[in-house]
Amino acid sequence: MAQLTQAQVLAYNKKVQAAKEKASQDKARKELAEKELARTCKELSDLLGKEITPENLEAEYEAFVAEAIKTMESGNRILEGLEQEQKEAMSEPATTVTVEDEPEGEPVVFTTPQVGNAKTNVADDLDSLLGLK
């Protein structure tokens, strides 16, 4: 049987103690990260108006990014179309339309045409259209 020395036992105990401290620190970091994640999910839920959980966070993020990219691409197409129209308008020669003033004299009088018999009252026409007369 192999002999254990006091030095070997002390070294072993030191390693065990270091491993316990590291495990304790890792546990504390994990708990802190989980609390931060829960707080962030709550904040996102309030901001977006739908439930965000650690389980659906990645899928919601990917959907959000996809929608943002789609919206940006659509906006860029619209802007490109506007820029193209502006370039075309700038390259076409400007056309000027001159409107001549009305000749001096009699004013132009607009009249409204009468429908049916001029003696007919408008109220009577409406009544007959509505089937009241």
Image (cartoon, rainbow, N blue to C red):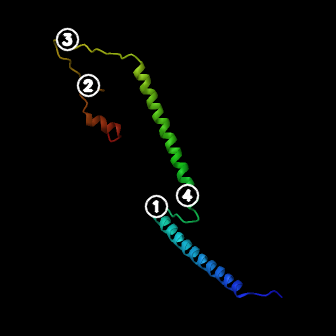
Work out whether mark 1 precedes mark 4 in sequence or the reverse, and give the earlier one. 1
**What amino acid is at disc 2?**
Thr
Which is more foreground, mark 1 or mark 2?
1
In 3D space, how far apart are the residues under numbered discs 2 and 4 (Cα atoms)? Answer: 64 Å
Which is more foreground, mark 3 or mark 1?
1
Which is more foreground, mark 2 or mark 4?
4
x and y percentages locating residue 64 in the rendered image? 53, 53
In 3D space, how far apart are the residues under numbered discs 2 and 3 (Cα atoms)? Answer: 24 Å
**What amino acid is at disc 1?**
Gly
Q: Which one is in front, 106 or 71?
A: 71
Farthest residue toward the left? 105
Badge 1 vs badge 4, beta-carbon distance below 8 Å: no
Q: Secondary structure at mark 1?
A: loop
Q: Is residue 128 above or below residue 17?
A: above
Which is more foreground, mark 1 or mark 4?
4
Q: Which residue is mark 3?
A: 103
Q: Which one is in front, 20 or 91?
A: 20
**What amino acid is at disc 3?**
Pro
In 3D space, how far apart are the residues under numbered discs 1 and 2 (Cα atoms)? Answer: 58 Å
Q: Secondary structure at mark 3?
A: loop
In 3D space, how far apart are the residues under numbered discs 1 and 4 (Cα atoms)? Answer: 12 Å
Seen at 53% across and 49% down, the residue is 67
Q: Secondary structure at mark 4?
A: helix
Seen at 28% across and 14% down, the residue is 98
Work out whether mark 2 precedes mark 3 in sequence or the reverse, and give the earlier one. 3
Q: Which residue is mark 4?
A: 60
Work out whether mark 2 precedes mark 4 in sequence or the reverse, and give the earlier one. 4
Residue 49's tag is 1
Q: Exactly how many numbered labels are in the figure?
A: 4
**Quadrant where the C terminus is found in the figure:** top left
